[in-house]
Image (cartoon, rainbow, N blue to C red):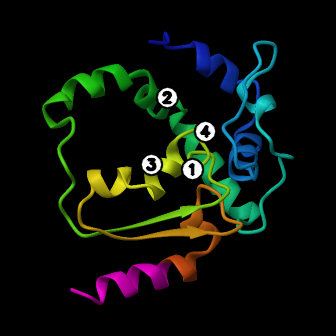
Amino acid sequence: MQEPGVAEAEFALYDNSHKFKTVFGMRKPAPPILPKDKTFFDSLDSDGTCPPWLSEEDISYYADKFEKTGFTGGLNYYRCMDLNWELSAPWTGAPIKIATKFIVGDLDVTYSVPGVKDYIHKGGLKASVPNLEDVVVMEGVSHFCNQEKPNEVSDYICEFFSKF
């Protein structure tokens, strides 16, 4: 577990607008490589400009909110992963039994983690989610598909819900 303060010190090197532009602007469909001699934000494949699907006003809103609260709460989620695994151990391997439609962007870094595409498209996800009805891979879209292509995502969701 990472001790509190380490990531916060690195986050303090950059203003919040830069942090959000960097993360939201990632377009490389591969997990980031984080060299030891670079910071997290300097390692990401992003030019640090506002992506076209967000306005400077949006970025300012996020930046202002995190200026008040800081990033410790969000970082604690990642610090607590071992505990989360322990607490959810009774449900390990339990199938998700509700009807599901899975939507992902082809530029999402999580979609490009080794093994994930095979898991999704070669039966692993269907085994974990037996009522998986559809997998949609949106082209040219990253992790924030609902913000990048809100109308398309809404259409997929409405089409899915219309069955019920």
Residue 42 in which image quadrant = top right
Q: Amino acid at mark 4?
A: Glu
Q: Looking at the picture, tell me which residue is in the foreground, 27 or 39.
A: 27
Q: CA distance from mark 2 to mark 3?
A: 27 Å
Nearest to the eye among marks 1 and 4: give it: 1
Question: Which mark, by number, is residue 75?
Answer: 2
Local packing at callout 1 (Cα closer than 10 Å; few below 14, some 14-19, many 20+) is many
Local packing at callout 4 (Cα closer than 10 Å; few below 14, some 14-19, many 20+) is few
- Identify the element where label 4 is drawn: helix
Q: CA distance from mark 4 to mark 2?
A: 15 Å
Q: Is residue 24 magenta?
A: no
Q: Which stretch is magenta?
A: 154-164
- Residue located 69% across and 43% down the image: 30
Q: Amino acid at mark 1?
A: Tyr
Residue at the limit of the structure toward the front, as seen here = 122
Which of marks 1 and 3 precedes in the sequence? 1
- Identify the element where label 3 is drawn: helix
